[in-house]
Image (cartoon, rainbow, N blue to C red):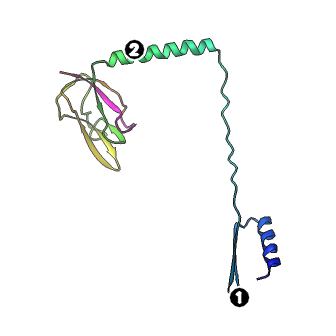
């Protein structure tokens, strides 16, 4: 194969949108490929600048809120989701919920259903006690190990 022909092919390849070219002539094979450089553009959302004093005050307020929620939940047992799925409080849309706030449950009592891949998984209590709070709304997605209920152990 003629070297001038190869040079012409290289120029044609560079000028075109073709990325690979392979030619075989008289038992000689030439393969040409060009690297594609991808330019990645990163854009940042405009965030308004706020007063540092307001930030400091809001940080103190949020820390106080976190402390209050931790204090409220101190001594309570969390029942967590063992799987990722959709949380349902009742076995069917027209049925009564398995439990309500204030109900006393024992270990093994069915508390809810978490649907995963069209399978309805009954979630049972792992301890005995009184249901203090239901942390997830009916029909909402839940993550693995996400708290579902707060239980005051008896």
- Determine whether the residue tagged by mark 1 lies in a helix, strand or loop: loop
Q: Which residue is mark 2?
A: 68
How many residues crowd mark 2 within 10 Å: few (<14), some (14–19), many (20+)?
few
Q: Residue at x 71, y 64 (%)?
A: 34
Q: CA distance from mark 1 to mark 2?
A: 83 Å
Q: Is residue 134 left or right of residue 152?
A: right
Viewer-proximal residue, 72 or 10? Answer: 10
Considering every residue shown, the one lying at the far front of the view is 3
Up the image or down, 18 lies above or below 38; here it is below
Quadrant location, the N terminus: bottom right
Quarter location, residue 147 = top left
Q: Position of residue 5 (x, y in %)?
A: 80, 78
Up the image or down, 110 lies above or below 48; here it is below
Q: Residue at x 67, y 21 (%)?
A: 49
Q: Position of residue 69 (x, y in %)?
A: 38, 18
Q: Position of residue 29 (x, y in %)?
A: 68, 80
The range drawn in magenta is 138-152
Check residue 26 in the rendering and tell me which mark sits there, or answer none: 1
């Amino acid at each position: 194969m003629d070297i001038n022909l190869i040079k012409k092919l290289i120029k044609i390849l560079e000028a075109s949108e073709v990325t690979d070219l392979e030619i075989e002539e008289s038992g000689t094979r030439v393969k040409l490929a060009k690297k594609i450089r991808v330019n990645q553009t990163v854009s940042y959302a405009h965030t308004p600048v706020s007063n540092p004093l307001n930030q400091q005050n809001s940080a103190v307020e949020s820390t106080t809120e976190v402390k209050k929620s931790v204090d409220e939940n101190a001594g309570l047992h969390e029942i967590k989701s063992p799987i990722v799925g959709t949380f349902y409080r009742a076995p069917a849309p027209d049925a009564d919920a398995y439990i309500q706030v204030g109900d006393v449950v024992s270990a093994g009592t069915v508390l809810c259903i978490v649907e995963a891949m069209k399978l309805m998984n009954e979630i049972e209590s792992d301890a005995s006690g009184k249901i203090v709070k239901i942390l997830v709304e009916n029909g909402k997605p839940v993550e693995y190990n996400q708290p579902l209920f707060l239980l005051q152990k008896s």
